[in-house]
Image (tube, rainbow, N blue to C red):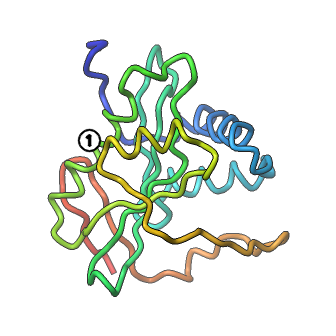
């Protein structure tokens, strides 16, 4: 693989352990608490097994290890009459930072997203104290929108119920997102 142009590929189940390891490292770095490993494993497996329903990971690998990752999740936004792709679980292994891997991940996913006219843009959340990440995101035309992200998570939640969502979406590296429901 050309070191200057790393390949971005859709993650597969073979990337499960690397993505879990990266997500745990991300949680440690952000100081937002370490997720329950069983819950994290179940969530990553769900996304990898059904990206049209739970979100799609794209990764960059080096020597068969995931060294950069990005998770995209679709959310309809009625104010924009289109879908916003939420960027989540962005992580680049520390030894590979500063080499443009986020840029490569972002440009790859933006190029795909722009093929679908229903997609109106990207959103992500970033820690207010993570100035380095904010500078990187600003270089990619992202900016604070004036809102704070607030949350209320429950300590115990039901297992994922695959029947709860009847409309699914396909996000392909080569095709626009398409509804299958």
Q: Nearer the viewer, residue 14 or 152?
A: 152
- Give the image location of residue 149, x and y in percent: 59, 68
**Occupied quadrant, residue 76:** bottom left
Residue visible at 61% across and 51% down in the picture: 127
Query: The residue tagged with tag 1: helix, strand or loop?
Result: helix
76 over 25 or under it: above or below: below
Q: Is residue 74 left or right of residue 36?
A: left
Q: Position of residue 123 (x, y in %)?
A: 41, 61
| Residue at 65 percent of width and 72 percent of height | 150
At 68% from the left and 72% from the top, the residue drawn is: 151
Q: In this image, 31 relative to 129: left or right?
A: right
Quarter of the picture containing the C terminus is bottom left
Task: Quarter of the image for the N terminus: give it.
Answer: top left
The number of discs equals 1
Q: Is residue 41 left or right of residue 95?
A: right
Q: Position of residue 141 (x, y in %)?
A: 29, 50
Residue at the limit of the structure toward the bottom, as seen here: 78
Residue drawn at x 41%, y 73% is: 75
Instruction: Farthest residue to the right: give it.
Output: 155
Q: Measured from the top left, where is residue 178 in percent x and y?
A: 24, 69
Work out whether residue 121 or residue 37 is closer to the camera in this orientation and state it.
121
**Foreground pick, 59 / 94:** 94
Q: Residues within 10 Å of mark 1 (few under 14, many from 20)?
A: some
Q: Quadrant of residue 26?
A: top right
Q: Where is mark 1, residue-wise?
A: 108
Answer above or below: position of 57 versus 125: above
């Amino acid at each position: 693989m050309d070191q200057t142009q790393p390949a971005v590929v859709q993650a597969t189940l073979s990337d499960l352990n690397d993505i879990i390891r990266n997500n745990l490292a991300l949680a440690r770095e952000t100081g937002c608490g370490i997720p329950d490993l069983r819950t994290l494993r179940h969530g990553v497996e769900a996304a990898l097994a059904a990206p049209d329903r739970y979100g799609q990971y794209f990764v960059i690998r080096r020597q068969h290890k995931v060294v950069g990752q990005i998770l995209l999740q679709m959310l309809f936004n009625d104010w924009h009459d289109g879908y916003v792709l939420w960027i989540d679980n962005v992580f680049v292994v520390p030894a590979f930072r500063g080499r443009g891997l986020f840029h490569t991940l972002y440009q790859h996913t933006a190029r795909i997203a722009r093929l679908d006219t229903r997609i109106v843009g990207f959103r992500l959340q970033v820690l207010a104290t993570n100035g380095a990440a904010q500078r990187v995101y600003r270089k990619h035309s992202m900016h604070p929108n004036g809102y704070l992200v607030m949350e209320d998570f429950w300590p115990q939640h039901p297992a994922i119920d695959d029947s709860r969502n009847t409309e699914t979406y396909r996000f392909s590296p080569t095709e626009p997102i398409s509804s299958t429901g």
